Amino acid sequence: MNSAPRGKLIVISGPSGVGKGTVIKRLFELMPERLVPSVSATTRPPRPGEVDGVDYHFLTPEEFERRQRAGDFIESFQVYGHWYGTLESEVRPSLEQGKWVILEVDVQGAEAVRERFPDALRIFIMPPSLEELERRLRLRGSEDETQIRARLDVARREMEQADRFDVQIVNNDVEQAARQIRDLLERAAA
Ligand code: 5GP
């Protein structure tokens, strides 16, 4: 259990609406052989088009709590009123196979992962500005006004933590941001 894993853990974080999901999707296209995703568990209901087991493992609050008690999570936190967590079973087996596992977590999750996996590479994706982040959140259309305000407040606080990460990438352009991360990972492997 505590033997040094051969793979690499890459933690990607950043404020809600910054475009982490899109950048990560492109990163997988750029490095399909090397990377595997860790599918998080959540109690949030699926958005239209989201698939159970692909986007998230959608769990009931009872099931989530049962798995927390069973010690199945590397980290779990409440984000915007719902639980989110990284399952150990999504991470360890891939690391032991020498894969590079991509975790997309909030800032609290990234901090908790660092305690368990001090060698993890932690990347923070920044918006070009808070105004742009607000525009993107509105464009996505999945949150109401109160939720958008809450996400912007959290985003402000999260951005103050950006320098605790190993690398900061500004998402001005998805292709550019994904390539920057790919180059970084290739350098880390060299
Ligand atoms: P969304 O509901 O928009 O998919 O995600 C909301 C927030 O939860 C995002 O900031 C996302 O990075 C974060 N998140 C997703 N999965 C996890 C996880 O497993 N752990 C933690 N701590 N945060 C997560």
Image (cartoon, rainbow, N blue to C red):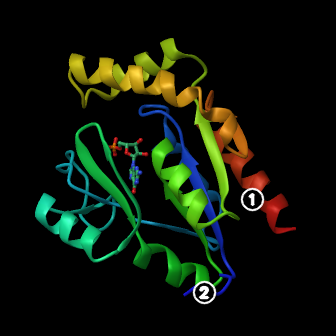
- Above/below status of 48 relative to 157: below
Q: CA distance from mark 1 to mark 2?
A: 18 Å
Classify mark 2: helix, strand or loop.
loop
Residue 185: mark in rendering: 1
- At which x and y percent is residue 41? 30, 62
Report the residue at 51% width, 55% height from top.
Answer: 112
Query: Relative to residue 85, is residue 164 drawn left or right?
Result: right
Compared with 68, 80 (above or below) is: above
Q: Position of residue 49 (x, y in %)?
A: 23, 50
> Closer to the camera, 130 or 177?
130
Neighbour tally class for label 2: few under 14, some 14-19, many 20 plus, Cα within 10 Å = few
In which quadrant of the rendered view does residue 170 lie? top right
Q: To which quarter of the image does residue 56 belong?
A: bottom left
From the image, tell me which residue sits under label 2.
97
Residue 10 in sight from this viewpoint? yes
How far from the left and from the top, in percent, is residue 51?
25, 60
